[in-house]
Image (spheres, grey):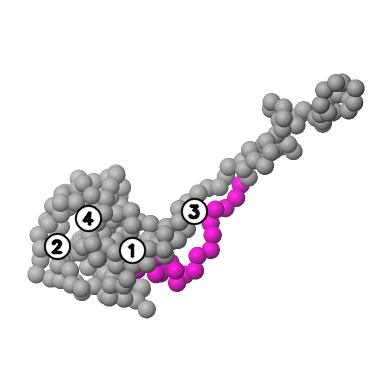
């Protein structure tokens, strides 16, 4: 599959890039995508929730009244969950929501997401460019030239570029990542994928079986 290469001014160049069938041309596996996205979102949860149970509540362990003869139900100490201010029964405790997902499933999910975007023609290839200084306005102009200022875009770089990342950080619908940190959630969360020419080569180098 060949895709034309555009420059930062939004004009099509004479160059084109051939996308690997092993990465951009497989049959998308929706269940693998679901599992990988679920795995990513679960790992983002802090899991620091905590409520005070009976042993955590401050209070005396003294029995409030004698066991029999009061005409009311038997009770223990003031920490009883039935009382206001008592401990909670089976409250939430700190825990990790992360779960194991096989590496092959992650690879299948990522390649499925890339293939789905390629199938829907939501991939744009850009000539390699760099920015001397962080400039939100400059990056916004690039998106405007490509008619993508209103779309959620994900720009994939071959290596981390601090100036480009900082330039996109204040734009709500834009995100920039390197090939090494690419994940299925970011791929599926974008309307358009924008690759630099060098990033395509890096993807084929690292992802190809």
Q: Which residue is found at the position 9% from the left and 59% from the top?
A: 11
Callout 4: 10 Å neighbours few (<14), some, many (20+)?
some
**Disc 2 versus disc 1: distance between alpha carbons?**
22 Å
Say whether marks 1 and 4 touch (CB < 8 Å).
no
Q: CA distance from mark 1 to mark 4?
A: 29 Å
First in sequence: mark 3 vs mark 1: 3
Alpha carbon separation for disc pair 4 and 2:
17 Å
Residue 176 sits above or below residue 109 on the image: above
Camera-side mark, 2 or 1 = 1
How many numbered marks does the figure carry? Answer: 4
Furthest residue toward bottom: 209
Q: Position of residue 128 (x, y in %)?
A: 20, 64
In the rendered image, which quarter contains the N terminus? bottom left
Residue 97 inside the magenta-drawn segment: yes
Taking 8 as reference, is 86 above or below it? Answer: above
- At mark 3, the secondary structure is helix
Mark 4 residue element: loop
Lower sequence index among marks 4 and 2? 2
**Badge 1 is on which residue?**
113
Which picture quadrant has residue 190?
bottom left
Question: Callout 1: helix, strand or loop?
Answer: helix
Query: Mark 3 and mark 2: span between their CA atoms?
Result: 37 Å
- Which residues lie in the magenta part? 94-111
Q: Name the residue that disc number 4 marks.
A: 131
Residue 64 magenta: no
Disc with the residue nearer the chain's start (3 vs 4): 3
Q: Position of residue 123 (x, y in %)?
A: 22, 62
Judged by depth in the image, the label closer to the viewer, 3 or 4, is 3
Query: Which label is found at residue 6?
Result: 2
Instruction: In the rendered structure, find residue 42 and report the number of the disc placed on it.
Output: 3
Residue at left 31%, top 76%?
Answer: 22
């Amino acid at each position: 599959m060949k895709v034309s290469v555009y420059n930062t001014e939004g004009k099509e160049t004479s160059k084109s890039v051939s996308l690997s069938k092993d990465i951009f041309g497989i049959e998308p596996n929706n269940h693998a995508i679901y599992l990988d996205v679920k795995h990513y979102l679960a790992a983002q949860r802090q899991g620091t929730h905590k409520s005070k149970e009976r042993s955590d509540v401050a209070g005396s362990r003294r029995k409030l009244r004698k066991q029999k003869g009061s005409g009311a139900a038997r009770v223990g100490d003031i920490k009883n969950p039935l009382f206001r201010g008592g401990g909670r029964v089976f409250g939430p405790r700190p825990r990790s929501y992360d779960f194991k997902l096989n590496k092959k499933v992650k690879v299948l999910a990522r390649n499925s997401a890339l293939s789905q975007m390629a199938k829907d023609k939501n991939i744009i290839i850009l000539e390699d460019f760099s920015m001397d200084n962080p400039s939100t306005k400059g990056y916004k102009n690039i998106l405007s030239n490509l008619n993508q200022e209103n779309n959620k875009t994900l720009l994939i770089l071959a290596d981390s570029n601090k100036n480009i990342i900082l330039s996109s950080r204040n734009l709500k619908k834009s995100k920039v990542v390197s090939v090494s940190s690419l994940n299925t959630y970011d791929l599926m969360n974008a309307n358009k994928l924008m690759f630099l020419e060098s990033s395509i080569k890096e993807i084929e180098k690292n992802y190809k079986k």
